[in-house]
Amino acid sequence: MVGNAGGASQTLRVNGPIRPSHKSNLRFPYTCAWWTRAWRLTVNPARSAMVETRIKPYNEQVAEQARRAQQQRTYRRNQVLGLILVAVVILGWALLHTNPSWIFPIGWWRP
């Protein structure tokens, strides 16, 4: 169990059977050696390698921001078109599956 300041506690969940020698280590997961080895294996080295630490020129920063703004506009436009398409499909389904006399009452074409 790991104590938190708010009084809540977290437990370490292990999938599969627990060996008797590790039961005491489950109470203090940060103090056992197998936990640190498992933690190192789960850290994604590619994620930390993607961080760019160099200082970019101003023109490159502005070009990136413009590209990102264009991507966001395209993404939002596609979202709106998708939502409109879903709304049209729902409306069409509702119109096709409703009672025709509700949409076209008797004599609706006569003045």
Image (cartoon, rainbow, N blue to C red):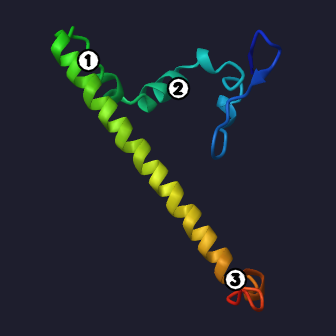
Location of residue 34 with respect to 17 vertically, above or below: above
Q: Indicate the quadrant where residue 105 lies.
A: bottom right
Residue at the spot 21% in from the left edge and 8% down from the top edge:
55
CB within 8 Å, label 1 to label 2: no
The residue indicated by pointer 2 is: 34
Residue in the foreground of this view, choosing between 21 and 88: 88
Q: Quadrant of the N terminus?
A: top right
Quadrant in which the C terminus is drawn: bottom right
Cα distance in 3D space between marks 1 and 2:
32 Å
In the figure, is residue 24 to the left or right of 6? left
Disc nearer the start of the sequence (1/3): 1
Q: Is residue 85 left or right of residue 94?
A: left
Whether 67 is drawn above or below 7: the answer is below
Marks 1 & 3, CB-CB < 8 Å contact: no
Which marked residue is nearer to the observer: mark 1 or mark 3? 3
Residue drawn at x 38%, y 36% as measured from the top left:
72
Q: Amino acid at mark 3?
A: His
Density class for disc 3 (Cα within 10 Å; few <14, some 14-19, many ≥20) is: few
Q: Along the polypeptide, which appears first: circle 3 or circle 2?
A: 2
**Which of pointers 3 and 2 indicates the residue nearer the eye?**
3
Total marks shown come to 3
Badge 2 marks a residue whose secondary structure is helix
Q: Is residue 31 above or below residue 13?
A: above
Mark on residue 97?
3
Report the side of 26 relative to 81 (left or right).
right
Query: What amino acid type should be assigned to the residue bearing mark 1?
Result: Glu
N-terminal label among 1 and 2: 2
Tag 1 residue:
52
**Mark 2 is on which residue type?**
Trp
SS state under label 1: loop
Any mark on residue 21, and which? none
CA distance for labels 1 and 3: 56 Å
